[in-house]
Image (cartoon, rainbow, N blue to C red):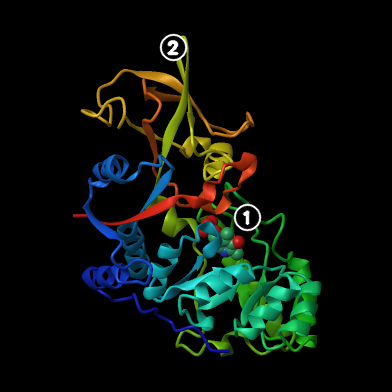
Amino acid sequence: MASPPVLFSAVGLSPKDRQAIIVEAPTVRNKVTHLLKDGLTGFMQSLILNHHHTKEPFYVLDLGVVDNLMDNWTRFLPMIRPFYAVKCNSDPALLAAMATLDMGFDCASQAEIESILALGVSPGLIIFANPCKLDSHIRYAASVRVNLTTFDSGTEVEKIREFHPKCSLLIRIKPPDDGGSMWPLDSKFGALPEEVEPLLQAAKAAQLPVIGVSFHIGSRAACSRAYAVAIEAAKKVFEAAAQLGMPPMRTYFPDTTGMSIIAEPGRFFVESAFTLAANIIGKRVRGELREYWINDGVYGSLMCSALFEPKNLTCRPLGCNSNRENPTCEGALTYSSTVFGPTLDALDTVMKGHGLPDLEVNDWLVFPNMGAYSSALRSNFNGFNTSAFSTYLTYSNPS
Ligand SMILES: *Cc1c(COP(=O)(O)O)cnc(C)c1O
């Protein structure tokens, strides 16, 4: 197995160099508007007034935010190579920008692997991090030499032995503590402590090298101690493998510490980089209450935020139609407002009791921090084609 390099190439690059590389990425080149830190609202206004006759919802992706997060990552965790979890947001410009900085990628399906290979990324920088894969996807991974995957069951070992006998494995373990995650994953994935030994033996019998351990605490974990206990549990797996007489997992990692550490961040790199703008398509006044319909919703890109994280969901008005002099509606009286999505399902309610000024049809609502598990979950329910949103690219400089 080609062992992942210890440091990836973004490490040590100056902010200027990284910015230059990012804005020249394929599918990014010539599409980036450079902004000052506070320039987003003005930029969105100009999009709406000058280019956005269709009134379709749209995203703004600030590549400067992604870059800044990468810079923080490489400064504080230079030995841990990030493998971005593609499922979190698979925007092509985002992926292309990340690929230019030699990021690794965590893919869960054939289509995700295809989209990353199409960017020219080496198969050695892809981990097929789905513990239960389709036969056909495993065969595909073998054909394109994506040679690292996770497993947590005996049937998976059998499938990999049959369809991809050259694959190296990471055993996915259930973390002892989910750290108060908003999206725990441990009910579905991860070997229990008593399952580890039989699984290691099954892999050994199948002549598949188990070269390490993986775990996922769960998305939006609140407590860092969960990582400490999970790493402790991973250590026990290394010891169990040694006791079974399996080759030490770390011989596959020739760097000086004897261990290669990767991480699979999704939300971290994208959540704050995307801002969504949706158009107000309807309004109802009931006494003091204002009710608005917008053209994105729970069956569009707002499912996660609206249904599962309503406390983190916020929006601000852009009164481009009713209040051109003061589109951000500063100082305007606010009313308790409900925001509905466009479909006929009452579940398609984006927010309730949110303070908004008195807006009109064809004004806009702007939702910040919309990069994680948003556009990735869109459906065409009720015939609303939410898959055609535009994404505009910016690079804002923090100073
Ligand atoms: C979804 C997923 C991730 C990313 O999780 P975030 O909470 O978005 O960082 C990483 N690894 C695996 C295996 C996943 O399924």
Position of 128 with respect to 73 (left or right) is: right
Element carrying mark 2: loop
User: In the rendered image, which residue does mark 2 sit on?
Assistant: 288
Q: Is residue 270 above or below residue 140?
A: above
Query: Looking at this view, is 230 or 283 the one in front?
Result: 283
Image coordinates of residue 313 in percent, x first then y, are 46, 38
Task: Identify the image quadrant of the N terminus.
Answer: bottom right
Q: Could one spot residue 43 in this view of the protein? A: yes
Earlier-in-chain disc, 2 versus 1: 1
Which residue shows up at 28% across the image and 65% down it? Answer: 30
Position of 367 with respect to 138 (left or right) is: left
Q: Residue furthest front?
A: 53
User: In the rendered image, which residue does mark 1 sit on?
Assistant: 177
Element carrying mark 1: loop
Image coordinates of residue 302 in percent, x first then y, are 52, 42
Under mark 2, the amino acid is Glu
